[in-house]
Image (cartoon, rainbow, N blue to C red):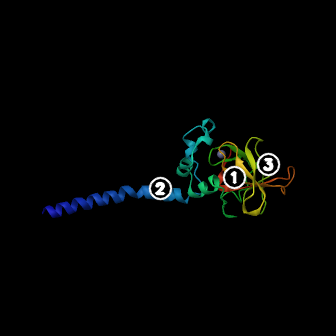
Amino acid sequence: MYGKILLSIILIIGAYLLISRGPLVMKNAEAMNKESNTEHLDEVNPDQVDWKAKDDDYWKEVLTPQQYAVCRHEGTERAFTGKYNSFKGHDGAFYCSSCGNKLFDASTKFDSGTGWPSFYDVASSSSVTLRTDERYGMSRTEVRCARCDAHLGHVFNDGPSPTGQRYCINSVCLMHKDN
Ligand SMILES: [Zn+2]
């Protein structure tokens, strides 16, 4: 008798746990499937935060695994896979997906055919910082976010007029807003 009651209680608790955990599991799956996360920017005024003071643990927690690998550890997304590669809109601007810093006006985006979003100019001279990248036996100029130091991509001298520059940027490091 007591055995049956105990079994019933265990079954009820088990069913409850299964039902209550369902949405949580789905939410995590959705987050994992997202290319990049910018929800941490909604909780604060991004212009008021000392983003360079954030440590690696913080970035690992708030960014998706791919976003973390590319933006915080100089990774590169596979060509033609990023969500902004074929983006054609000319309105608004692209912001840093780590810290919300304005990086590129959408009007300066062009189709470079390389498989990565490309821009011929930065939004302002203080948007990004440049540094020499000697990895992989090449000498390239790395582009970083001036506000949070996220790796964004590289800049080359084979871009279109009027600047002749080609900022080759990973989609996962960007967030487009219509302004
Ligand atoms: Zn940034």
> On the image, numbered disc 2 is attached to which residue?
27
Q: Position of residue 133 (x, y in %)?
A: 74, 55
Residue 19, picture quadrant:
bottom left
Residue 128, picture quadrant:
top right
Q: Who is closer to the viewer here, 162 or 99?
A: 99
> On the image, numbered disc 1 is attached to which residue?
152
Tag nearer the camera, 1 or 2: 1
**Residue in the picture at 21% in, 63% down:** 7
Instruction: Rate crowding at label 2 as few (under 14), some (14 to 19) or many (20 or more) other CA atoms within 10 Å.
Output: few
Q: Is residue 114 visible?
A: no
- Calculate the distance from the C-alpha at mark 1 to the C-alpha at mark 2: 28 Å
Mark 1: which amino acid? Leu
Q: Position of residue 135 (x, y in %)?
A: 72, 59
Q: Who is closer to the viewer here, 137 or 58?
A: 137
**Residue in the picture at 17% in, 64% down:** 4
Q: Who is closer to the viewer here, 40 or 157?
A: 157
**Residue in the picture at 55% in, 60% down:** 33
Q: Which mark is residue 121?
A: 3
Counting residues from the N terminus, which is met first, the one under dot 1 or under dot 2?
A: 2
Q: Quadrant of the N terminus?
A: bottom left
Q: Is residue 56 visible?
A: yes
